[in-house]
Image (cartoon, grey):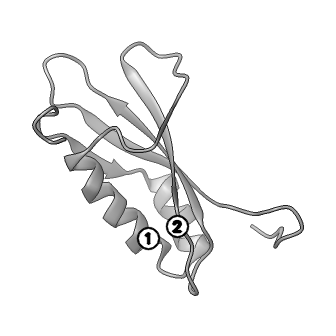
Amino acid sequence: MSSEHPHVLAEITSEARSRCVAVGGRALEAVEALRAELEKNPELGRRATSAAGRMKLYTTRLEGNAERPALTVTYVYDAPPPEPGIIRIALVSPVHFAGGDGEF
């Protein structure tokens, strides 16, 4: 894993951080843990289509617990040569199932 990727830097954008605070239930702590893991393995999650050159767009899901709902986290991995690149966690959204809580 980490041997394939030189150390990358990961950050949580201010918008994503604000969404975590709005969700509450220690969502920010969960996303912060994901941020740290992404620095070791920047290609976690499911790759989505990206329209911008070398930027890679990914989504991943953090399972919910008694304190917070499941979260969908979207991040961009920009790894121009020479690496290391940077990861920006750009969007955090609670997962709502059909018939479930429709708030937020």
Is 25 rendered above or below residue 95? Answer: below
Is 52 rendered above or below residue 8? Answer: above
Q: Give, as a three-letter code, the residue at label 2.
A: Cys
**In what element is the residue under mark 1?**
helix
Please give the name of the residue rendered at 35% of the width and 33% of the height, measured from the top-left corner: 77
Q: Give, as a three-letter code, the residue at label 1.
A: Leu
Residue 65 location in percent, x, y?
55, 80
Residue 36 location in percent, x, y?
25, 58
Is 36 rendered above or below residue 3? Answer: below
Specify the label residue 20 is tagged with.
2
**In what element is the residue under mark 2?**
helix
Residue 53 location in percent, x, y?
41, 12
Disc 1 crowd rating (10 Å Cα; few below 14, some 14-19, many 20+) is many
Q: In which quarter of the image is the C terminus?
A: bottom right
Q: Quadrant of residue 79?
A: top left
Please give the name of the residue rendered at 31% of the width and 50% of the height, measured from the top-left corner: 11
Disc 2 crowd rating (10 Å Cα; few below 14, some 14-19, many 20+) is many
Q: In which quarter of the image is residue 66?
A: bottom right
Which one is earlier in the sequence, the residue at label 1 or at label 2? Answer: 2
Q: Do the residues labelled 1 and 2 touch (CB within 8 Å)?
A: yes
Query: Between residues 59 and 78, which one lies in front from this camera angle?
Result: 59
Give the residue number, with chain letter if any, for mark 1. 28
Specify the label residue 8 is tagged with.
none
